[in-house]
Structure formats: C-alpha cells, structure tokens
Amino acid sequence: MKRIIVFLLGIFCICLITACAIGRTYNYSNAWPSLSYSSAKKVTIAVHDQRNYVIKGQKSESYAGMLRGGYGNPWNVNTENNESLSDVMANNICSGLNNAGIKASKVLTKYTDSKSSILNTMVTTSKDNDRLIILTILDWYTDTYKDTTLYAHLVVEVYDGEKNNISKYEFKEERNLGYGIPYNTAPNAFKNIISTIFNKTEIKSSLTTD
Amino acid sequence: MTKLFRISSLLMCILFLVSCGAHYTYNNVKYGSKEEALAAQSQNQQEIQKQIIPTKNKYGGNSLFLIPSLNSIKATGIKKTGKPSEDLIDYVAQISMRDYKNTGECLDKRHIFNKVNIQDVDYPIQYAQEQKSKYDVVIYLKMLDPSQAQWMMICKPKYVERPIYMDMSTALGVPRIISLLDNIEENLKFCSER
C-alpha cells in the first residue's frame, strides 16, 4: 500500500513540475498581419534575426522568451517545433501580404547572413520584384513571471527592385501583455505590431505607389 | 495511511478529468465528440438547403465562389483566448469552413447562375483577382481578421468590387442566408452589361 501511495504522489509531483516551465513553446504560426490596403506590386520579403543574444550564441534562433519559476529563475521558451523565429515571422508576413491581395514571396535567412547578401539573394531569386522588404529583428522576446513583458525592436526597410532604399520604419517598445503565460498574447502582439508597421503611411505608400 | 491514499487518488482523478474534459459545441448544444457535432451541423445545413427555392430572376453565366481554406481560417478567422488545443482550433475552423461552403451550396440551389464553382483557397482576395476574367461573377470572402470578414463580389465587364451584405437583424440560419442571396441578386443589377 505504501508503495502505491508513493508511486501516485510521485506521478502527481512530476505532473506538477513539468507543467510549470519545462518544454513550453509559443506557436507563432498563423499570426498573419492584417493590412488595410492591397497593391498590384510584386513583393519579396526577408526577415533577418540580428538579436544580440542570438549573434553571440547565447540563445538559439528559435528563442521566443523566458518563463520564470518561483524564485525568478528563467527557463527558455522557443517557437513551436523549434523553427527559427525569423522563418516563422517571414512565413506570417508573406501570408499576410498575400491574404491582402499582394503577390508576395519570401527568402529565408540566417543571422550570419549580411544585409547585402540577403538583398542579392532576393533579387536573383525573383527577378521581376517591384519591392524588396527586409525586416530586421533587433529584439524580440517575452519575459514572464506573473505578468508578461514583450521586448520588441524591429526595423522594416523597403527597397525597389534595384535595391535602392525607399522607406524605413523603426519600432521599439516594451509592451505589457498582461497576466499569465502569453500563449496567445505573444502571437497576437506580433500580429498587431506587424499590422501597425505595415499600415504606417510611409510603408503603405512605398508598397502602393511608384 | 488510508486517508493519504484517498487524497492522492483524488488528486490523480482531478488531473485526469481536467485533461480529458473536452467537448464540442454547435448551435449552443454540447457534443461529446467532434464527429457528433459535425453530423449535427450537416443535418442543420441539409434543412437549410431544403428551404432555398430557385429565383425568378435568373442571371445565368458561370460563377466562382471562393471560401478561405482551413489554414486561412485558422490564421484570420478564429479569435483565440487562453490556450485552445490544436484539436479545438481545427474543429472551429472546420465548422466555419463548412458554413461558408454551405452558403455557396445555397447559392447554387437558388439557381441565380448556371453554375456555381465552389473552391477553397489560402488567399481568396488574390485568387479572385487572378480568376475574375474567367468567370462572369466571382464571389469571395475577404477575411483579414475575425472582426473584419466581408463577402465581396466582382463581375464582368468592369470588375468593380462590391460588398455583399447579410441582414444581421434576421435570425441565424435560413433567413440570414436568404438575405445574403437577395443582396447578391441586388448587386447583379449593377453588372448587367455582360
């Protein structure tokens, strides 16, 4: 009887512990931005992860944030399936543009790529581009203890098909995502922030006018 | 010792129940399985379709009716709160997609057009633009996010896009679908020069 009790309590404790912080992921797929306009321009998008802690090798490219335990001890949270954050973001933005009626394709990048090599790849991959968009991630992670704070620093640059820069928009914010683990609030914040950036007049006009 | 055993057994049972308590709601009725809920939806849709009668103002021609794919609905058509399971998201997306498809089937039963081609695609707005020259009329669901969904129509020869409205003051089901079909007929008056 004692063995059974110890066994049951053991299982219960394991369930409790593993339910806390280990192996959590945030599903950023399907967080398509919502654009308030369409365009006949053909667009290629690349997302370039230039987060300091990724470049230094302290975090992986799939790093999405941290959950803190009772003593504030942090546990890493990654994207679902450990896909790199830049790939997930590129897929979402590409889908969001296509969903708004803009013909968009994407080029996947590594944090080790240079901006000029990315631009060259974008031009050679799809030769009749009207616009090239590079979104650079300088910061993107959530920190959850009781509340969650999102640290976001993104730069969007739009180029014409000849690689001439025609517009730039920088977004930097620490956003409180409220109480609890941001399973939905983090992807929703991404959707909201990217929608805000792409609906800004300077980005909108560079994607819709010559 | 027995008390301790009871407590630990109770905790295990609670954990088991909490993790296995999924249910599926359709028309405010809870079903124990996804299949039962989807079967109830099929039956309801059959009842709706039985009540659609052919129009007296046939327009003719070939039409394309575009609905968002499951993938597209999951991204743009579902408002998520908490941490819904993939299974639940999939269920809601299926229910929505089948409702959109049913709207297309009702349009077909109304016999406004000679033919209604129903297709599900990832990007209805883009696909509607690509296909508009091949059909007399293209009807599609413009869905940017759960709060911004609107049926739209493009017709020859000018390809002007017009919104199609549903009378939201009417009851869910047949009256609301009929209000949408009525509005399609109303909109067709603006594209009569084929």
Image: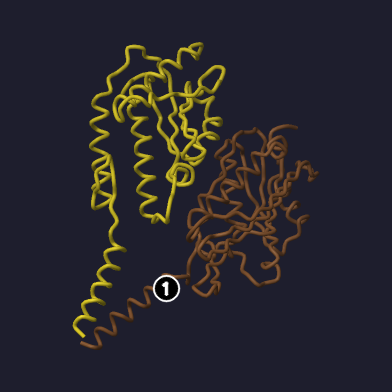
Q: Quadrant of residue A38?
A: top right
Q: Colour of chain A?
A: brown
Left or right: A51 with respect to B101? right
Q: Quadrant of residue B129?
A: top right
Q: Is residue A2 above or below residue A17?
A: below
Residue A135 place in picture, x, y as percent: 68, 51
- Crowd class of label 1 (few under 14; some 14 to 19; many from 20; radius 10 Å): few
Which residue shows up at 55% across the image and 72% down it?
A74
Residue B29 place in picture, x, y as percent: 24, 43
Find the residue positioned furthest to the bottom. A2
Residue B105 place in picture, x, y as percent: 33, 30
Amino acid type assigned to the residue bearing label 1 in the image:
Thr
Left or right: B140 with respect to A171? left
Which residue shows up at 37% across the image and 73% down it?
A15
What residue is pinned by disc 1? A18
Q: Is residue B68 above or below residue B168?
A: below
Q: Colour of chain B?
A: yellow
Between B146 and A149, which is closer to the camera in this rendering?
A: A149
Which residue shows up at 54% across the image and 64% down it?
A144
Q: Chain of mark 1?
A: A
Which residue shows up at 43% across the image and 19% down it?
B61
Residue A51 place in picture, x, y as percent: 68, 62
The image quadrant where one finds the N terminus of chain A is: bottom left
